Amino acid sequence: MIVLGIESSCDECSAALVQDGRQILSNVIATQIPFHAPWGGVVPEIASRKHAEWISSVVNEAFQRASLPLEAADGVAVTSQPGLMGSLLVGLSFAKAFAWARRVPFTACDHMLAHLYASRLDMPGIQTPPPYPFLALLVSGGHTLICRVEDFRTMTVLGTTVDDAAGEAFDKVSKHYGWGYPGGKHIDEYARTGNAAAFAFPVPKLHHGSPYDVSYSGLKTAAIHQCEFFRKQAETTAADLAASFQKAAIDVLIRALLNAVQDTGITTIVTGGGVAANSYLRSCLAAQQNVSCIFPAPELCGDNAAMVAGLGFEYLSRGIYTPFSVTANPRRAFRLS
Ligand code: KG4
Ligand code: ZN
């Protein structure tokens, strides 16, 4: 079964064709980053307008790159939540129209479940998908979730952020210092040559709520406004600051995740979302004893339609279709089907 996937929840306009939920035939990702970079963040009005301008040619390109005609799509899967309302509506409306016109089944997908699915797609060097249940670390610009995953569509959120999302903290610190947008990639690069002990930023300890919750607002404020207070050496560079911030931001996630491993006894962790591309996060998790970590290929960590098509296959191949009355939802609301 070949599924056309469409993703337009934020600032990537993407369409992909995926066979049997695993084999990527094409995955076109048209990024809007240059249009949002001057503002240091995604401007929702620009995002939805660009999606409306691009969606048709992005979908056509996905068929061209796969050397397939439109008739080859056996079903359509699209992100309907969570995300920017105007942006979601462009992809969702296009996907409904495509499925209706071609008389193929249609399913709406949750963006975070799709991120989770990225590590199940066939990529060179990627292992066979792990059996359920497992733990998931889903970290993006808008979400920070530690979950127990039962199957392709059932996950229980064990912990989350009580304030900013992990990617948001990277983006805000990077924006403040003028390192570039989106910030995660730039901080990751700067940090490679920096000394992570140059600043001793506090790893927040939460005394209320879940032992798997994290917080970023204190760290963000410390890195932006209280650097002098946490400085441990006389001379420091931007690379030192980036490395120290990155270490504190990732260590807090790893601590919460390891709490979940200890309490649930589940030792397989699947990661997803843009922050899962972070090299320090990947090396720290890979070095953990007695824990098996699965990372999507770096190019599948950010927003892309292949992960949506892959997840869509799980629904469509079981005959689970979404009615055309479904609408977009800026927040996560279960269940879709
Ligand atoms: O999943 P994603 O592409 O979009 C959302 O659904 O939000 O995630 C984007 C986020 C941004 O905040 C970006 O700064 C962050 O992922 N990111 C990274 C890295 N690459 C992207 N954060 C840390 N290290 C990276 N290498
Ligand atoms: Zn995302």
Image (spheres, rainbow, N blue to C red):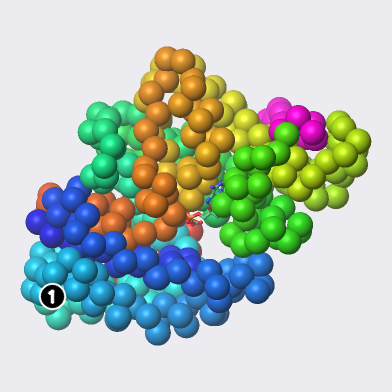
Q: Is residue 276 magenta?
A: no
Q: Which residue is mark 1?
A: 70
**Amino acid identity at mark 1:** Leu
Residue 33 location, x and y as percent?
Answer: 53, 69
Quarter occupied by residue 25: bottom left
Within the magenta stretch, is there residue 198?
yes
Give the x, y percent position of residue 230: 86, 35
Q: Is residue 205 left or right of residue 322?
A: right
- What secondary structure characterizes most of the magenta part? loop
Can see residue 149? yes
Please name the residue shown 10% across and 64% down the image: 74
Q: Nearer the viewer, residue 24 or 194?
A: 194
The residue sitting at 79% across, 45% down in the picture is: 237
User: Which residue is nearer to you in this view: 228 or 117?
Assistant: 228
Name the residue: 25% across, 29% down. 131
Q: Quadrant of residue 316?
A: bottom left
Seen from the viewer's position, the closer of residues 76 and 230 is 230
Which image quadrant: the C terminus?
bottom left
Q: Which residue is painted at 62% across and 66% down in the image?
A: 41
> Badge 1, how many Cα within 10 Å: few under 14, some, many 20+?
some
| Total tally of numbered discs in the picture | 1
Task: Locate the N terminus and report the quarter of the image it occupies.
Answer: bottom left
Horizontally, residue 286 falls left or right of residue 186, namely: left
Left or right of 230? Residue 39 is left
Q: Does residue 181 appear left or right of residue 71 in this picture? A: right
Coordinates of residue 9 in the picture (x, y in percent): 43, 65
Magenta stretch? 196-210
Q: Secondary structure at mark 1?
A: helix
Q: Is residue 63 above or below residue 304?
A: below
